[in-house]
Amino acid sequence: MGPEARAVRRVEECAREIVERHGFNELRIPLMERLKLYQRSSGETSDVVQKQMYLVQQHDDAAEADAVALRPEGTPGVIRAYIEAGLDRSDPEQRFYYSGPMLRYERPQKGRFREFNQFGVEVFGRGDAAIDAELLIMIDELRQALNVELEIQINSLGDVNCRPAFRDALLEYGRAHWSELCDDCHQRLDRNPLRLLDCKIDVKLAEGAPKSLDYLCEPCRVHFATVERLLSGAEVRYVVNPRLVRGLDYYMRTAFEVVSSAVGSQSAVVAGGRYDGLVEALGGAALAGTGFAIGVERMALVLQASGIVAEGRPDAALIALGEASLLAASKLGADLRRRGLRVEMLSPERGLKALMRRAGRLGARAAVIIGEDELARGVVQLRDLDASSQREVALELVGRELEAARNSSPD
Ligand code: HAM
């Protein structure tokens, strides 16, 4: 509602404009997909799959393999659609964006909802560092367009060649500190030791843990160095956070989060990274993939914290007094809106005093009043609500007068 809804819309509109300028095309993905799609992509060890999925009640005769879930994130659905359309074979290099609600069973708090919106992008067929840098440059463009403070954090998680050694080192570290680990870390250490690094409880332990950057193989090291070089070249401010790992299992090499202090403890407003291998794991060709998703409500909170997102003021509240002037007023309204003016016609069932109060509450610049006398003479009463002055204006000149008022005091 109100400023919140406006902030959400501003984030979505700005994001759409920026990604389209970078050549991204919209993809509309469904709200439900097969449960097994999420299990295979988001990852069996991820919180999303383990405890946050909303399952859809199945028909009695539906096979278990057809179980369906509401989407907790957009990436798997985009990949599924991309493969199903045969693009991985016929025209693999694609840039997609999508936007809409995601559902996760979480404990709600400020900036964390069970139903929230993401604006996401996915790029397929580009394994180079330049595209990772371009994604971060787009996020920086969004930061500038919205005029908000954000911190871009990046890390490299290595690839299939160097990650095993890093994983082993973490596993060894975790085992050596077994008695100090929290329950969650105990449970996931063997399956996904990387999560130790972003444990909110074992913060001290995470600080002393091995870092992926120290284990990168040469190609991963060069990839990460190129991302850094391109970001610096584009004057994008960022920090390397060696403890940054992602809650979803599919990431490799570049991973990033964009954080703000305005959202409380739920500080990540954008997150993403590279996921080469996932398209193939889901039955497609062996292709690179990379992307991110903006948490739209969280970004809107940041926007709101930095100032009010004002709606454009109505140029006029239109008031028809008496049955006879109703038609003329409604025609005038249509004419004014065709000129691009913002005009709200008020209820003909209320008295002038109440209507003037209403016009004031709407924040309208002017009230345009047509009574039977004005109708007969082809004029209106034009009341400037900022200056509290009123004059008579010929019907055909109302549009021009309202335009002049808008130009002399823009929103
Ligand atoms: P994610 O980190 O799970 O990544 O979510 C991305 C963003 O969505 C978060 O940084 C946050 O802003 C927002 N978000 C997540 N959960 C909630 C919630 N419960 N309430 C409000 N906002 C939330 C993904 O979803 C990946 N699919 C991103 C990606 C795209 N990676 C590659 N391509």
Image (cartoon, rainbow, N blue to C red):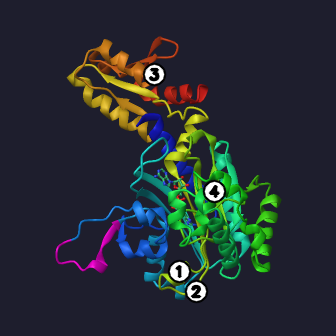
- SS label for mark 2: loop
Using a 10 Å C-alpha cutoff, classify the residue at mark 4 as few (fewer than 14 neighbours), some (14 to 19) or many (20 or more).
Answer: many
Q: Amino acid at mark 3?
A: Ala
Precedes in sequence: disc 3 or disc 4: 4
| Residue 296 pos. (x, y %) | 51, 50
Precedes in sequence: disc 1 or disc 4: 4
Precedes in sequence: disc 4 or disc 2: 4
State yes or no: discs 1 and 2 in contact (Cβ < 8 Å).
yes
Some atom of ligand 1 lies within 8 Å of the CB belonging to the residue at label 4: yes
Per the image, the residue denoted by label 4 is: 257
State yes or no: discs 1 and 4 in contact (Cβ < 8 Å).
no
- Specify whether 302 is left or right of 315: right
For the point 58% across and 35% down, the residue is: 305
* Marking on residue 90: none
Per the image, the residue denoted by label 3 is: 366
Q: Amino acid at mark 1?
A: Val
Per the image, the residue denoted by label 2 is: 286
Per the image, the residue denoted by label 1 is: 279
Q: What range of the chain is rendered magenta?
A: 59-69
Precedes in sequence: disc 3 or disc 2: 2
Q: Is residue 99 above or below residue 328?
A: below
